[in-house]
Image: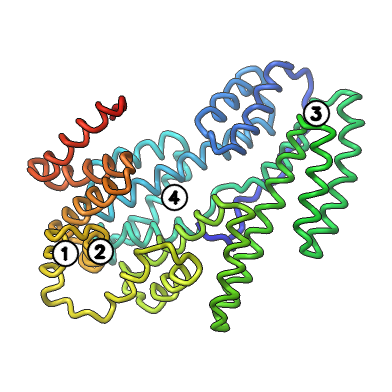
Amino acid sequence: MCRKCKSLIIASVIVTICSLSPDASMNLKQAVDLYMKNNYDAALKKAEAHIKFNSEDELGKEIKDMIEKTISYGYLKKGFTLMSEGLYKMADSELEKASEYSSDYSLAIEEEYSQYLKQYSKEKAANKILYDLLQQPKPDEIEMYEISRKLRERLADDEYMEKYKEFEKLKMKVTKLEKKSDWSEAVDAVSEYLAEIPDSIDAKLLLTQINRKAAQAFYEQALVLLEQAKVEEAREKAKLSRERDAQWYINSIDSEMEEAAMNIAMGEDEKAKNKLNIVKYLDPGNQAAPIYLQLFDEDMDGFFERSLKLYEEGDYLEASVRFNFFRLRMPEDKLSKLYYHLAAARRYIKEVNLEKVREHLIKALEISPGEVEALDIFDRLQDVMEVMGLTF
């Protein structure tokens, strides 16, 4: 998802609520906490439990709607990814789930897809939608943080409010430090507060927020330095970004790769190269980006055959990248899609990422149900997982 896009705006979420059920209000508090931990299904159950007892609570409705849209976003992204690969039945299943959670949001995206279908093939139109979705972030935790604060005011007792006044002082101090980009001092200030009040969820969320802002700031500095061709300095900033919030950093790199893939599919080669160079320089451990960059100048005549030769020689990383490049260029070519998933499955076997192996094998079998090689890999994977005591 695009880091620079603003997330969904929450307006007028707090109203005066009378005669709330204490237990149900606690459900809403738990819903917020679970959402912040990306446990959306559990968060939705808690929000629904709150609404059951407080059907007129606008704050509860707003949070429930936010959670449903976030879940729907995830299914839409999965669905159109499958659609872009020509896996229509699997795609329809994911899109139906998206509609179940947020029909209005899902319908708006599918209407946009229908418009693209007037100009492009199904696969190409799906890639256009995926690109659009990457620019539409789910509601971010800063906004949910504000809801969390207001919710805790609603639930607060006198003892809590005394602690909360101290927390407000902490927030003011942190805000001043953030304006100076003094991230370490800000983290230390919150850490000291947590040493005194270790069960403060607000302080824990604030600490997460500081590290997230710091990670984003360092990452954006790295991008500026890259534009100035200061590669080593850019890498240092990227390292700092990862140290502050590893998951945010990884998600940002993944987002660059996803956008590059969409650019390739839409024939926007220069944009794709720009994204891939960002990954190449800021994340030297990424082996795929340099391979993609070499492919733009390669003659497409015999491209598939050369890729197949690498696959047969056991170079599954390069083969999977090449097949992916080819299928993005030729979205209706089923053979390149099939071999992309086979190569990716074998690549992830080497990396012992069994869930990814399973995911790619299922897609391969959807494309070619009787594919002997996919079935053989599947059987051997099941044997390995049985030995490890795991199940599909």
- Label 4 and label 1: CA atoms lie apart by 42 Å
Whichever of labels 3 and 2 marks the residue nearer the N terminus, that label is 3
Please tell me whether mark 4 sits on a helix, a strand or a loop.
Answer: helix
Instruction: Indicate the amino acid at tag 3.
Output: Arg
Relative image position of residue 59 (x, y in whole percent): 69, 33
Left or right: 77, with 301 as reference point: right
Q: Secondary structure at mark 1?
A: helix
Q: CA distance from mark 1 to mark 3?
A: 62 Å
Q: Are marks 2 and 1 in contact (CB under 8 Å)?
A: yes
Q: Nearer the viewer, mark 4 or mark 3?
A: 3
Question: Quadrant of residue 357 in the image?
Answer: top left
- Picture residue at 37% right of the left edge, 67% below the top: 289
Q: Is residue 27 above or below residue 283?
A: above
Question: What residue does disc 4 label?
Answer: 108
Residue lying at the far bottom in this picture: please name it. 228
Q: Position of residue 222 (x, y in %)?
A: 59, 71
Give the residue at mark 1: 310
- Amino acid type indicated by mark 1: Leu
Q: Is residue 219 left or right of residue 101?
A: right
In the picture, the quarter occupied by the C terminus is top left
Circle 3 SS class = helix
Query: What number is the disc on residue 154?
Result: 3
N-terminal label among 1 and 3: 3
* Residue picked out by circle 2: 318
Disc on the earlier residue, 4 or 3: 4
- Mark 2 vs mark 1, CA separation in Å: 7 Å
The amino acid type, in three-letter code, at marker 2 is Glu
